Image: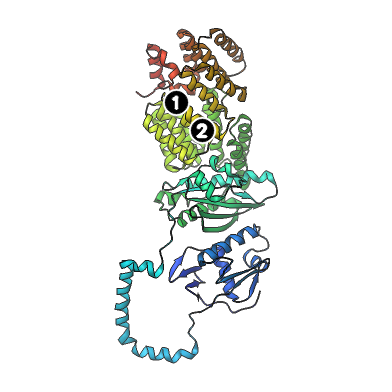
């Protein structure tokens, strides 16, 4: 690089000035929101005006040899943001010239504030008159400042131009790209994406799209504006993750969607043990760049950090990677990684929360299921309580604890308090709104439930489970046409989504369209061959449609299965209700009560129970489960 005298503290060129010491670029005295790498590059170019600064020289100055970075990507983005700030483009540069495959050169005129020695006498003569002139100048300056501040006649806009500040209240974090050649490391980049989403989701004034929806855009060829339109957000975050041993580097870029505009970019490098602080730094800086006002609690939440054992963190991230796949095999792997993380560091709260989430869904009839609730829900409760003992700020742990309190303890008041606590900690947690809607609907609070369901959908618009949940809401509020419509939208996202076919079958059944119901439930059974609950519901359709022989065959088969597998007694009760065998139905409901079936919380709203609601035994069961009046 050409040797040159370092620039003065403030360097002026055209309408711009760079405060080198503060790292601030200003235009006509107004600070431009530019920092980090673009400012560093501008400083280097200004040190060598008129001379080519090669790409290798920039790499040497900006990235020490022992660091790792996607150099081409970072340099390209930084130059693009610098040009945008200077109001120029590469084809007709006024300040920064690109020399293809070589480097860059500053070509603009320079004017520093250093006073040349030849005009010193003028300065001296000015000093003789300053006692007379200064008071008048100050008065004039004050008047002009007030006039401009009031923007009288639009003068401020005419003099300085309108301040450009994007109105951003919704954002999506696109899947961060792993720079590792090892494809097995993808889980780590995905985990970092989820962590950043979680941190930004804590800001109530910002709508942040959930992980499930953004992961659909991994390796997509769609343009950023197209993605933003589909997710209905104002801005996008994209970036890269590189890990070498226990060192981690994240490069993040913030892009306004319409019109497309680079707002900010920065690179962060930390030890893996400081990962929480790094994640908080990125999230906090993004909120500053889009001028979101944080509450005092949000400031604290995005400032809190503590060191983490790097190996335990990697195991936890790997567990979450498999947890979101949401099937029995992936859950088994997730639980193994969570347990390994706990064994590595028993004081690390997050893996306990991961275990709680697994156990909750193992005991759910309509999800992974397959295990008796009275066997797995106490484990979920224990894990959630341990997580909260170690870190009471984990929104997902409060959410899992709330779900257990609702479906296992039947503590409706305590469950609602925990759901609200979870959403206070992370207002952007889509599954928090989703599960809270379960409590509201099962309580009969339909309008509130619909509000929470729609909020979950706003946060996770292309998630199959969240779209399905809205269809489930319409099903249990007896809006069957709307349920079918919403479930059809869900199948557009995933034509092989078994639960959507299953729920469509339930809607068709209530509409007495039994062939259609059996067709849809048959598809679900093919997709979930080991799920006994869907087989029970097929038996119920046989029963209510008058096909008693097939209904009895389903009961006999399920009783044989119960000798070595868990069969939800609530589902068996539904077949008996369809056959008009109420005595046996209530025997099965009593067994489901002893097992703490999660389905009992829906006694008030499940339309398949309508024929037994007038029975005194049903009212007694409602009372014991504690369903609110």
In the drawing, does residue 329 fall left or right of residue 568? right
What SS does tag 2 mark?
Answer: helix
Instruction: Classify mark 2: residues with Cα within 10 Å, few (<14), some (14-19) or many (20+).
Output: some
Foreground of the two, 304 or 19: 19
Instruction: Say above or below: 131 vs 412.
Output: below
Residue 464 position in % (x across, y down): 53, 34
Tell me, yes or no, whether the two marked residues, 2 and 1, touch with CB atoms within 8 Å: no
Q: Nearer the viewer, residue 275 or 573?
A: 573
- Look at the image and tell me whether residue 380 can be seen: yes
404 is higher (above) or lower (below) than 391: above
To which residue does mark 2 refer? 489
Gap between marks 2 and 1 measured at Cα: 13 Å
Badge 1: residue crowd in 10 Å (few <14, some 14–19, many ≥20): some
Q: Which residue is mark 1?
A: 481
Residue 444 image point, x, y percent: 37, 26
Residue 224 position in % (x across, y down): 55, 50
Frontmost residue, 203 versus 504: 504
Q: Give the side of residue 480 with respect to residue 39, left or right.
A: left
Say which residue appears at 61% left-offset and 46% top-offset.
220
**Image: 389 above or below 248:** above
């Amino acid at each position: 690089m050409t040797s040159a005298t370092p620039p003065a503290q403030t360097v002026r060129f055209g309408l711009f000035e760079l405060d080198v010491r503060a790292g601030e670029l200003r235009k006509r005295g107004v600070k431009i929101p530019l920092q980090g790498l673009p400012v560093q590059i501008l400083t280097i170019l200004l040190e060598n005006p008129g001379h080519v600064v090669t790409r290798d020289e920039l790499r040497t100055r900006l990235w020490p040899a022992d660091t790792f970075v996607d150099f081409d990507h970072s340099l390209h983005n930084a130059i693009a943001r610098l040009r945008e700030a200077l109001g120029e483009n590469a084809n007709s540069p006024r300040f920064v010239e690109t020399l293809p495959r070589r480097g860059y050169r500053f070509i603009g005129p320079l004017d520093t504030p250093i006073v040349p020695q030849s005009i010193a006498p003028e300065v001296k003569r000015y000093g003789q008159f300053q006692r007379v002139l200064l008071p008048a100048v100050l008065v004039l300056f004050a008047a002009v400042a007030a006039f401009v501040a009031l923007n009288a006649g639009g003068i401020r806009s005419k003099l300085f131009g309108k301040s450009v500040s994007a109105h951003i209240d919704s954002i999506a974090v696109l899947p961060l790209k792993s720079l590792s050649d090892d494809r097995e490391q993808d889980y780590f980049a995905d985990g970092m994406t989820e962590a950043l989403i979680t941190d930004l989701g804590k800001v109530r004034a910002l709508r942040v799209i959930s992980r499930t929806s953004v992961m659909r855009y991994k390796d997509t060829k769609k343009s950023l504006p197209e993605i933003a339109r589909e997710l209905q957000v104002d801005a996008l975050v994209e970036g890269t993750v590189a890990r070498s041993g226990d060192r981690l580097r994240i490069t993040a870029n913030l892009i306004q969607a319409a019109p497309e505009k680079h707002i900010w970019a920065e690179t962060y490098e930390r030890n893996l043990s400081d990962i929480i602080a790094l994640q908080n730094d990125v999230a906090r800086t993004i909120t500053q760049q889009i001028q979101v006002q944080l509450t005092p609690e949000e400031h604290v939440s995005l400032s809190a950090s503590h060191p983490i054992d790097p190996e335990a963190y990697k195991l936890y991230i790997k567990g979450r990677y498999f947890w979101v796949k949401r099937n029995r095999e992936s859950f088994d792997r997730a639980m193994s990684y969570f347990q390994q993380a706990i064994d590595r560091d028993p004081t690390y709260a997050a893996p306990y929360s991961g275990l709680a989430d697994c156990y909750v869904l193992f005991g759910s009839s309509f999800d992974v299921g397959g295990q008796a609730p009275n066997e797995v829900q106490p484990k979920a409760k224990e894990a959630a309580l341990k997580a909260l003992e170690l870190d009471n700020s984990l929104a997902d742990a409060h959410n899992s604890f709330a779900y257990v309190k609702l479906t296992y303890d039947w503590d409706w008041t305590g469950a609602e308090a925990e759901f609200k606590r979870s959403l206070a900690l992370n207002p952007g947690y889509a599954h928090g709104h989703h599960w809270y809607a379960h409590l509201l609907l099962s309580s009969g609070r339909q309008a509130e439930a619909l509000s929470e369901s729609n909020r979950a959908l706003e946060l996770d618009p292309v998630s199959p489970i969240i779209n399905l949940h809205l269809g489930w809401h319409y099903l249990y509020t007896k809006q069957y046409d709307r349920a079918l419509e919403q479930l059809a939208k869900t199948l557009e996202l995933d034509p092989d989504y078994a639960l959507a076919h299953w729920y469509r079958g339930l809607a068709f059944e209530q509409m007495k369209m039994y062939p259609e119901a059996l067709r849809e439930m048959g598809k679900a059974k093919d997709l979930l061959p080991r799920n006994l609950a869907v087989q029970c519901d097929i038996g119920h359709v046989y029963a209510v449609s008058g096909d008693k022989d097939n209904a009895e065959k389903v009961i006999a088969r399920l009783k044989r299965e119960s000798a070595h597998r868990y069969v939800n007694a609530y589902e068996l009760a539904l077949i008996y209700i369809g056959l008009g065998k109420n005595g046996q139905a209530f025997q099965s409901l009593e067994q489901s009560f002893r097992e703490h079936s999660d389905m009992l919380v829906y006694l008030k709203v499940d339309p398949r129970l309508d024929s037994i609601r007038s029975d005194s035994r049903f009212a007694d069961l409602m009372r014991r489960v504690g369903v609110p009046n």
